[in-house]
């Protein structure tokens, strides 16, 4: 699904990723953990092509295609989805209009027939229900005045409608109370399938009690310094990250 | 007097009703003493009148039945008066009036009506506040008087369309509208200005006066849809009595030059004035809105929201003056002006101008100038929305709040596609907005 080799990236001329290697197979769930400033969020932004994030070396392939030469929207069409840690508010653009534009664009490029308005509305309402978001949110401006938890659930709703191949969840659990976390985890678990992979970027192992990862990686100093199974996350919770910096 | 000023007088047609002659004479007199503003005049600092240095002549009457061509005009239920090049077109107008409403052309006024019109004309214009008012008086041959008697509520909108069809030569057109709302009455008025697709150069001198009686409410929409070489210099001057409400919505697509002055004079306590406005110049067009709210008495409120999107090498001016007189205690006034520049060569000059002489007032103002936010654009693209469509969605989103606030449903239905398409090269880019 995803193959990253020796990825180096910088933001404002400051090197953040320094030789990151990561391979995620189809249907797998990988967790990336690490201390603040280790480059966890940067990885997602680099893969999504955010302005200001410069790749200086290395490669990243999604489904065998070179991700780094594609425009941001082309990456989305191919199947990449980044759930933001801080979703953007867009007053004046309704959530519905935004979702329809996204779904239409993605389906068009995947050669899937367009959804008519009625079918789209039906799917959108179902997605709202699945993430426990009132349908009134469809008519509001994108994320406009949403609470932190509502924004995260709105991200999840977009993910459900776009049916991506690789979902990168950037600290989706941060700022969520335990009920909201359960809703988000249920949503993610429901979307797991043999041809869809997940990268859960998180600070805490708490999320991994709800979504069992196949692999856990520790990112430190811009590289993956240790990988293991779920037990690594539990160990991190017990021991913190400091001991790994010695390993690195 | 320079060439333009002399020509402007010479262009006046001679077929006015006799009762307008004293007003014309006064106007000629005042105009001959007027100096045309220059860039050194504070209120014209950013707007040049160079576009007026041409030969303008009075437009000939358009024959009845002559086609309008492709003019984008709202289709509204209710009476519609259409003027082309300053001349009334009965063949294009619908004059069936709702009960109670009087809608009279100056040219048709009975002697009683003429007396009322003559007494009221100019009374809403504060002295010295409209440089081109004397020229409007001097060249006035016809206009419209909209009269809503006390305690009368007119539900259907009244639509007055002022069109220029454009000849080979440059024409000059005088537009005048007088609106009187009696006590506790209510009405909705839509003024549209447009030119036909074949339109040539035109200079429109527009002037609308609103006299809003105690407890009355006027919903006033003024749409400047003229494009191309049209120069429009005009304004709306309103006087509000106690507890009256003026809800104004103003739109200006760009053309060679548009300068619109909106002056609201609150003369009775409890009056509320709301002005929303959009200006969207592109190419090398110029739009200049000068607004002024005179809070002259206590316990009045005002709210202004103006948004502009300025593209290419276009320029815009927004000057929002709020004048709170010493006796106008307990005034609440809000002014917000937001601008989006979509090109490095676009220009906006925005100035909130607060003059507060009372001490117990609440006044908030703000002006912003921005470009499309790159991270917001990126966010849309991470969801697969192509860049060009994302730009159209965000540009329209910038003004959407004010479009959604247009209470007249038919008008909103007209405005949405008109404005959305303004930002898009092809219709696919607006398909999710509409």
Image: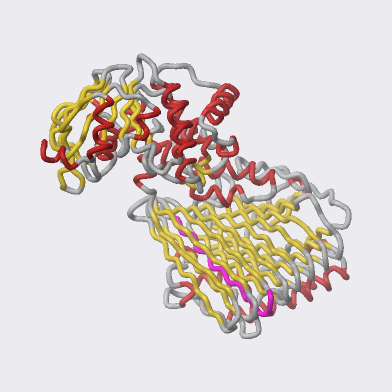
Q: Is residue B188 left or right of residue A69?
A: right
Q: Is residue B281 left or right of residue B271?
A: left
Q: Quadrant of residue A201?
A: top left
Question: Measured from the top left, where is residue B12 in percent x and y?
Answer: 65, 67
Q: Is residue B172 left or right of residue A34?
A: right
Q: Is residue B291 magenta?
A: yes
How many numbered discs sit on the rendered protein?
A: 0
- A145 or A201, which is in the foreground? A201
Q: Is residue A104 among the parts visible in the rendering?
A: no
- A166 or A109, which is in the foreground? A166
* Range covered by the magenta-colored residues: B285-299
Quadrant of the drawing holding the C terminus of chain B: top right
- A47 or B131, which is in the foreground? A47
- Seen as rendered, the residue at the extreme top is A194
Question: Measured from the top left, where is residue A183 in percent x and y?
Answer: 48, 31
Which residue appears at 33% of the width and 27% of the height? A80
Question: Measured from the top left, where is residue A205 in percent x and y?
Answer: 32, 34
Classify A242 as above or below B193.
above
Which residue appears at 49% of the width and 52% of the height? B280
Magenta highlight: main SS: strand
Q: Quadrant of residue A235?
A: top left
Classify A186 as above or below B164.
above
Q: Is residue B41 magenta?
A: no
Q: Is residue B123 among the parts visible in the rendering?
A: yes
């Amino acid at each position: 699904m995803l193959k990253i080799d020796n990825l180096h990236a910088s933001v404002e001329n400051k090197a953040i990723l320094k030789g990151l290697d990561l391979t995620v197979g189809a249907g797998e769930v990988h967790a990336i953990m690490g201390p603040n400033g280790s480059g966890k969020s940067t990885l997602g932004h680099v893969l999504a092509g955010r302005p200001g994030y410069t790749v200086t070396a290395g490669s990243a392939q999604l489904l065998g295609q070179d991700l780094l030469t594609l425009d941001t929207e082309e990456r989305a069409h191919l199947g990449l989805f980044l759930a933001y840690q801080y979703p953007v508010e867009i007053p004046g653009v309704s959530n519905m209009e935004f979702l329809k534009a996204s779904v239409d664009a993605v389906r068009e490029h995947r050669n899937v027939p367009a959804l008519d308005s009625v079918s789209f509305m039906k799917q959108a309402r179902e997605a709202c229900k699945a993430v426990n978001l009132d349908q009134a949110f469809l008519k509001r401006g994108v994320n406009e005045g949403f609470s932190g938890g509502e924004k995260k659930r709105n991200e999840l709703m977009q993910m459900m409608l776009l049916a991506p191949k690789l979902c990168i969840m950037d600290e989706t659990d941060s700022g969520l109370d335990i009920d909201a976390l359960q809703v988000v985890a249920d949503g993610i678990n429901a979307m797991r399938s043999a041809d869809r992979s997940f990268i859960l970027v998180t600070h805490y192992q708490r999320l991994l009690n709800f979504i069992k990862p196949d692999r856990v990686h520790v990112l430190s100093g811009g590289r993956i310094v240790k990988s293991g199974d779920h037990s690594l996350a539990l160990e991190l919770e017990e021991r913190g990250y400091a001991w790994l910096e010695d390993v690195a | 007097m320079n060439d333009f000023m002399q020509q402007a007088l010479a262009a006046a047609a001679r077929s006015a009703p006799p009762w307008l002659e004293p007003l014309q004479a006064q106007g000629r007199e005042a105009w001959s003493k007027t100096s045309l503003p220059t860039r050194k005049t504070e209120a014209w600092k950013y707007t040049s009148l160079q576009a007026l240095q041409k030969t303008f002549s009075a437009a000939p009457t358009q024959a009845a039945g002559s086609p309008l061509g492709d003019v984008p005009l709202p289709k509204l239920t209710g009476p519609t008066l259409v003027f082309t090049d300053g001349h009334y077109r009965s063949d294009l107008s619908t004059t069936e009036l709702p009960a109670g409403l009087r809608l009279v052309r100056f040219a048709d006024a009975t002697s009683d009506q003429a007396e009322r019109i003559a007494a009221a004309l100019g009374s809403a214009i504060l002295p010295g506040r409209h440089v081109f008012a004397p020229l409007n008086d001097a060249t006035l041959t016809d206009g419209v008087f909209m009269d809503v008697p006390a305690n009368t509520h007119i539900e259907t909108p009244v639509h007055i369309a002022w069109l220029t069809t454009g000849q080979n030569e440059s024409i000059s057109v005088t537009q005048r509208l007088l609106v009187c709302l009696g006590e506790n009455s209510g009405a909705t008025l839509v003024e549209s200005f447009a030119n036909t697709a074949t339109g040539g150069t035109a200079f429109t001198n527009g002037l609308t006066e609103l006299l809003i009686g105690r407890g009355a409410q006027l919903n006033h929409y003024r749409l400047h849809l003229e494009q191309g070489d049209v120069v429009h210099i005009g304004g709306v001057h309103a006087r509000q009595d106690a507890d009256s409400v003026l809800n104004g919505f103003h739109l200006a697509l760009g053309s060679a030059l548009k300068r619109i002055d909106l002056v609201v004079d609150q003369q009775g306590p409890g009056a509320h004035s709301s002005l929303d406005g959009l200006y969207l110049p592109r190419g090398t067009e110029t739009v200049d809105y000068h607004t002024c709210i005179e809070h002259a008495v206590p316990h009045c409120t005002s709210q202004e929201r103006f948004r502009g999107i300025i593209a290419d090498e276009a320029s815009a001016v927004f000057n929002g003056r709020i004048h709170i007189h010493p006796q106008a205690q307990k005034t609440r006034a809000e002014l917000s002006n937001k601008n989006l520049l979509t090109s490095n060569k676009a220009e906006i000059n925005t100035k909130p101008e607060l003059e507060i002489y009372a001490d117990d007032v609440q006044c908030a103002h703000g002006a912003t100038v921005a470009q499309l936010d790159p991270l917001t654009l990126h966010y849309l693209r991470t969801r697969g929305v192509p860049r060009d469509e994302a730009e159209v969605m965000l540009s329209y989103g910038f003004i959407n709040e004010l479009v959604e606030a247009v209470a007249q449903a038919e008008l909103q239905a007209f405005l949405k596609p008109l404005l959305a398409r303004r930002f898009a090269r092809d219709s696919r880019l607006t398909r999710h907005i509409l």
